[in-house]
Amino acid sequence: MAVKLKLTRLGSKKHPFYRVVAANDETRRDGRPLEFLGYYNPMVNPAEVKLDAAKIKEWLGRGAEPTNTVRALIKEHLG
């Protein structure tokens, strides 16, 4: 079973707020994650992103694959 780093959607209609989580690739978008790794709020200008670098590096070291969006967030905010 593979693990993915992906976004889960929170917030209300037309006001999204996302959590960055580690979850099994078969888990639905808002299903139960293995661990919370940070959040992404696109509704403020500039977008607010908070990521736990240590946890993300740990999951990547275990072989977790980030989605394209999470990969872009990691590259932009963690270098």
Image: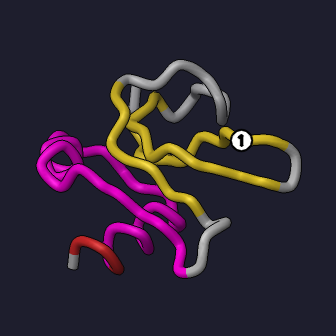
Residue at disc 1, secondary structure: strand
Residue 63 drawn at (x, y percent)? 23, 45
Eyeballing the image, is 14 above or below 55? Answer: below
Residue lying at the far top of the rendered structure:
32
Question: For the C terminus, which image quadrant?
Answer: bottom left
The quarter of the displayed image where residue 45 is located: bottom right
Residue shown at 50%/47% (left/top)?
6
Eyeballing the image, is 57 above or below 34? Answer: below
> Which residue bears the numbered disc 1?
11
Colour convention of the picture: secondary structure
Query: Which amino acid does the dot numbered 1 rest on?
Result: Gly
Question: For the N terminus, which image quadrant?
Answer: top left
The quarter of the displayed image where residue 9 is located: top right
Residue 37 drawn at (x, y percent)? 33, 42
Q: Is residue 69 left or right of residue 43?
A: left
Residue shown at 37%/34% (left/top)?
36
As for residue 50 lying within the magenta part, the answer is yes
Residue 60 drawn at (x, y percent)? 21, 50
Magenta segment range?
46-75
Residue shown at 42%/69% (left/top)?
73
